[in-house]
Image (cartoon, grey):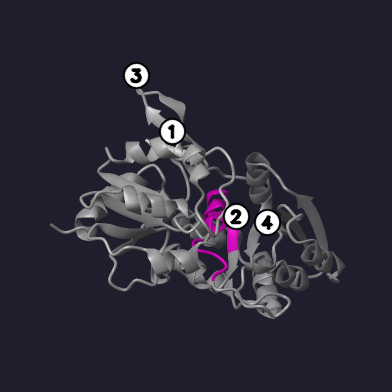
């Protein structure tokens, strides 16, 4: 079974009694094997959790409701925690998290595991990024425009789009796809940057349009950075690098910064030669020129091998079985 809130759950300074009436979706298989959705309030969710062997909390640093789960769970129940990067509860959580015999962290990458500030707690990084149904069929596509590049993601300072814009060689194009409404000042700064090539602002696009953009581009540029354009430093800009794997699936070469999570993915895919230092437009520009000059068959061979590895190690389809296989090591008898 799985539960999801029907509305935004704010982080609160004090827990309110009304939280027990908040509603969640309950997703479960019926006797025919079909999925059904029911609605439960938070109190009912907590009561139903008592029947589970394993309780898995995704985005456990997102809301104080996680503390209710700790209070309601029995000592014989296994609690698994996954952050997925949304962490407003961190200051409160790490002061109140109980020391339980069956508490473990299942993170989306080894880098994410390294950020858990509980040295004694068991943890494992288990990666997943794509479903089998989303895998692209191998094809002999027409040659791509070797001067067409793209950047995908919400237009936020930690994405470092300014590095890609200033690196763009003359005669090349960069199409940026993502919601630009979150930080108007940053978006305005980006639009004012001089560029040698053409910058196309696509706004927010759907999954089909994203797949088409990746399929039409020679390379994806991911410039995520710890140091923002205004000098502010963020603790972590990415926990995995989903867009890198989406690019590989579309036959699009990923170019990305040398941040820890990207390093992990690119090393897995044997594509580390296509990385550049954070905020280093000159190094990125050199890679963009290499994309245009490299023999197409060489790049295609790299992407074919990367895609095979992704299909073997990054599927959501066998994610839960892989977590189950890790449980004996997380909770030895």
Residue 309 shown left or right of residue 201 in the figure: left
The numbered mark, 1 or 4, whose residue comes first in the sequence reads 1
Separation of residues labelled 1 and 4 (CA atoms): 29 Å
Disc 3: which residue: 32
Circle 3: element type: loop
Label 1 packing within 10 angstroms: few (<14), some (14-19), many (20+): some
Q: Can residue 142 be seen at all in this image of the molecule?
A: no
Give the label, 3 or 2, closer to the camera. 3
Separation of residues labelled 3 and 2 (CA atoms): 40 Å
Residue 145 shown left or right of residue 275 in the figure: right
Which residues lie in the magenta part?
236-254
Separation of residues labelled 4 and 2 (CA atoms): 19 Å
Q: Can residue 302 be seen at all in this image of the molecule?
A: yes
Q: Residue at x 51, y 39 (%)?
A: 22
Separation of residues labelled 3 and 1 (CA atoms): 17 Å
Whether residue 238 appears in magenta in the rendering, the answer is: yes
Disc 2: which residue: 252
Q: Nearer the viewer, residue 33 or 37?
A: 37
Q: Residue at x 44, y 57 (%)?
A: 305
Q: Residue furthest left?
A: 333
The numbered mark, 3 or 2, whose residue comes first in the sequence reads 3
Which of the 4 image quadrants contains residue 45? top left
Residue 212 shown left or right of residue 19 in the figure: right
Disc 4: which residue: 154
The total number of labels drawn is 4
Separation of residues labelled 1 and 2 (CA atoms): 38 Å
**Do residues under tags 4 and 2 come within 8 Å of each other at their CB atoms?**
no
Give the label, 1 or 4, closer to the camera. 1
Q: Is residue 83 above or below residue 76?
A: below
Circle 4: element type: loop
Where does residue 201 sit, x and y in percent of width and height? 80, 54
């Amino acid at each position: 079974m799985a539960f999801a809130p029907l509305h935004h759950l704010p982080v609160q300074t004090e827990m309110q009694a009304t939280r027990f009436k908040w509603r969640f979706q309950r997703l479960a298989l019926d006797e025919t094997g079909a999925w059904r959705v029911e609605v439960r309030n938070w109190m009912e969710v907590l009561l139903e959790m008592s029947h589970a062997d394993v309780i898995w909390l995704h985005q456990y640093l997102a809301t104080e409701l996680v503390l209710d789960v700790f209070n309601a769970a029995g000592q014989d129940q296994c609690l698994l925690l996954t952050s997925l990067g949304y962490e407003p509860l961190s200051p409160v959580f790490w002061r109140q998290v109980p020391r339980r015999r069956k508490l473990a962290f299942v993170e989306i990458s080894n880098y994410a595991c390294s950020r858990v500030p509980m040295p004694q707690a068991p943890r494992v990084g288990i990666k997943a990024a794509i479903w089998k149904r989303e895998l692209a069929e191998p094809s002999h596509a027409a040659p791509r425009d070797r001067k067409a590049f793209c950047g995908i993601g919400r237009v936020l300072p930690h994405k470092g789009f300014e590095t890609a814009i200033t690196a763009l060689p003359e005669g090349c194009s960069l199409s940026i796809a993502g919601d630009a409404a979150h930080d108007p000042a940053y978006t305005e700064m980006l639009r004012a940057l001089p560029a040698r090539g053409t910058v196309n602002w696509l706004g927010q696009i759907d999954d089909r349009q994203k797949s088409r953009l990746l399929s039409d581009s020679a390379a994806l540029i991911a410039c995520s950075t710890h140091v923002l354009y205004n000098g502010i430093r963020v603790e972590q800009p990415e926990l995995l690098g989903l867009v890198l794997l989406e690019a590989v699936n579309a036959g699009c070469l990923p170019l990305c910064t040398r941040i820890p999570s990207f390093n992990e993915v690119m090393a897995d895919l044997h594509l580390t030669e296509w990385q550049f230092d954070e905020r280093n437009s000159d190094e990125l520009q050199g890679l963009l020129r290499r994309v245009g000059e490299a023999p197409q068959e060489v790049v295609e061979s790299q992407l074919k091998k990367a895609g095979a590895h992704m299909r073997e190690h990054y599927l959501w389809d066998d994610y839960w079985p892989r977590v189950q296989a890790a449980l004996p090591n997380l909770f030895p008898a």
